[in-house]
Amino acid sequence: MPEIAIQMLMAAREFYPTNPALLIRLGHLFTATNQMDAARQCFEEVVEMCPNDIRAIKAYKDAMARDSMVKGGWTDATREGGSFRDMVKDLKESVTLEQESRAVRSRESVDLLIKDAQDNIRLQPDNINYRRTLANLFVEGGRFDDAIRTIEEARRVSGIDEGQLYQVRATIRLKQLDSAIAQLKENGDLEGAAAKQLEKDAFLFEDVRGRVERYPNDMPLRFEYGV
């Protein structure tokens, strides 16, 4: 039952308040039970922690739109002479404004930011935040191999949480696979896209299994893995 799963994850959230996987799962459960305000808040927290996570951004926008529909009251709108089409139009405009407020940087500006981040790392090679910023910028520019290489280099920095870096590296790999799948579909190679999707599914499974083995007492991970 979704309600029981929600209670379990809410309890786990007390111990792991910044776990993106937990928040995503909780957000989807809230969505399934039509608790859209709670779902929106979960996805919003993930977007704030992982601003380049395309799936989290999409889930947040969908939850925001559905939450607006619930709060706006479709039946009230129709009684007042409005229509469902009018409401959808308004919601699309709201989402568009939200997208514009989070304007996507141009390739040129991303390249400049990458150069700045690289300069910062040369000045402070032990600053993990600079390396994390550089990895995110590489992802934004579609340079996934460079992003993964940056994370691998960060492992040499002392005092770094290996588990956190592993999670970042896995997230980048997923985005790389998603990008490849989208490109194959755009090129009309549906067979190649299906094969790449299987590769992604296998990676997801192995990623979660590996994290469960490293952190056997992590309740959200065990829930995600189903053990």
Image (cartoon, rainbow, N blue to C red):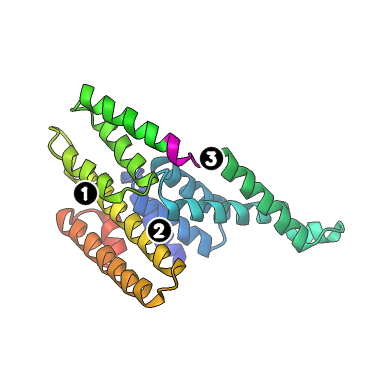
Marks 3 and 1, how far apart in space?
Answer: 28 Å
Along the line of sight, the residue nearer the viewer: 183 or 91:
183
Relative to 205, is 12 above or below? above
Q: Nearer the viewer, mark 3 or mark 1?
A: 3
Along the line of sight, the residue nearer the viewer: 156 or 69:
156
Relative to 59, is 115 above or below? above
Residue positioned most to the top: 123
For residue 106, side relative to residue 204 (left or right) = right
Residue type at mark 1: give it: Tyr
Which label's residue is closer to the chain start, 2 or 3? 2
Residue 65 occupies quadrant: bottom right
Q: Residue at x 27, y 25 (%)?
A: 120
Which label's residue is closer to the chain start, 1 or 2? 2
Residue type at mark 2: give it: Arg
Magenta-drawn stretch contains 104:
yes
Question: Residue 80: percent from the left, percent from the top?
Answer: 86, 56
Name the residue tied to disc 3.
102
**Does any portion of residue 94 appear in the rendered image?**
yes
Q: Which mark is residue 166?
A: 1
Q: Nearer the viewer, mark 2 or mark 3?
A: 3
Name the residue tied to disc 2.
25
Q: Which residues are magenta?
A: 103-109
For residue 79, side relative to residue 224 (left or right) = right
